[in-house]
Structure formats: structure tokens, C-alpha cells
Image: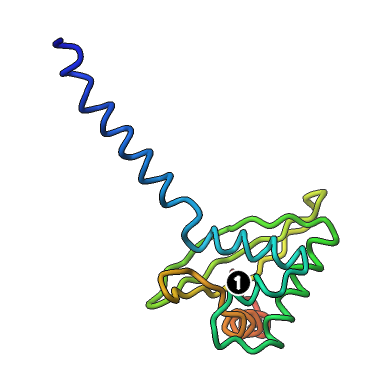
Amino acid sequence: MGILRTWAPSVVLTILVGLVFFVLRGFGPESTLQKFHVAAANGDFKTLQNLSTADSPQRALIKIQNQVLGFAQRGYRYEVRSIQPQKGYVIAVVNYVHPAGQAVIPMPFVLVKQSAQWVVNPQASLSLLSQVSAAPGTSF
């Protein structure tokens, strides 16, 4: 009986922590980026729209879709390099890694929370990409 009393709190705590992680899986900027990349690679524009800000210009979303699709078609894999919290949004830097590891191309994604869901802001993402590309010596 003494062993049960000693271990019971630890077991209960372990189960509770596991349940919290189970319930929260699939949420967060990383999950949104993963779903966004799968949808872009599959040409699923409707899902891309659902994973983007409601007021996203269609041309911005198409441009990002084409960039992501181009990387996927050339065999690049994506890795989330960093998530940088800002006031009201996050900047996620995604590295596209060449299949042979010869090249790594970084690309920023701006994500905001809308209706308790993280979504990509295509216009802000493209704007940030062009700012960084235009500034000499600047990178992520």
C-alpha cells in the first residue's frame, strides 16, 4: 500500500501531462506551416485559403503557393528553423533544404492568430521576404 501511495501522484501527473500534449497536438504555428506546405504541394488551393488570413489577396497566396510547390517539385524538404514571436504575430523562418544538402534557402512566413487558429499572412510574408532580399547583407 505504501508503494501505491508513493507512485500514484507521479503516475497521475504523467498521464495528465500526456493528455495535455495529446490535446494540443496539431495546434500552433508549426502545425499550420506543415498543413500549408502539404496543401501547396498537392495544389489544394481551398485548404491554402483556409490556412491563410481572411483578407489575403489571391495573387499573394498564389505566389507563395507557386514558390512552395516549386521547392517541393525539385525535391527540397522544408524545416522550420525558427519561430520568432512579435507583438500580435510570429515570424517563422523556414529553410528549404536541397535533396543532397547542397543548398539551404530560407523563407519567412508571417503567421497571425485568427479565431483561435494560426494562419499564414501571405501578403505580409511576401513583403518581409522582399525587404530582406532588397537589403544588402541581410538574412534570417
Front residue of this view, candidates 135 and 70? 70
Q: Quadrant of residue 30?
A: bottom right
Q: Is residue 113 above or below residue 126?
A: above
Q: Return the x and y of residue 77 as percentages of the image width and height.
A: 73, 55
Residue under numbered circle 1: 108
Q: Is residue 107 left or right of residue 25?
A: right
Asked whether, in this view, residue 40 is left or right of residue 8, the answer is: right
Name the amino acid, label 1.
Pro
Spot occupied by residue 100 in the image (x, y as percentages of width and height): 82, 48
Task: Tell me: residue 122, above or below residue 41.
Answer: below
At which x and y percent is residue 51? 58, 72
Relative horizontal placement of residue 93, taking residue 46 as reference (left or right): left
Q: Residue at x 59, y 69 (%)?
A: 140
Q: Helix, strand, or loop for circle 1?
A: strand
In the rendered image, which quarter is residue 4 located in? Answer: top left
Q: Tag 1: Cα neighbours inside 10 Å, few (<14), some, or many (≥20)?
A: many
- In this figure, which colouring scheme has been used for the structure? rainbow
Q: Residue at x 47, y 71 (%)?
A: 90
Residue at the location (65% across, 70% down)? Answer: 47
Q: Which residue is drawn at 66% across and 84% down?
A: 130
Q: How many labels does the image show?
A: 1
Residue 63, x across and y down, in percent: 74, 81
- Left or right of 13: which side holds 92? right
| Foreground residue among 67 and 82 | 67
Q: In which quarter of the image is the N terminus?
A: top left
Residue pushed farthest front?
46
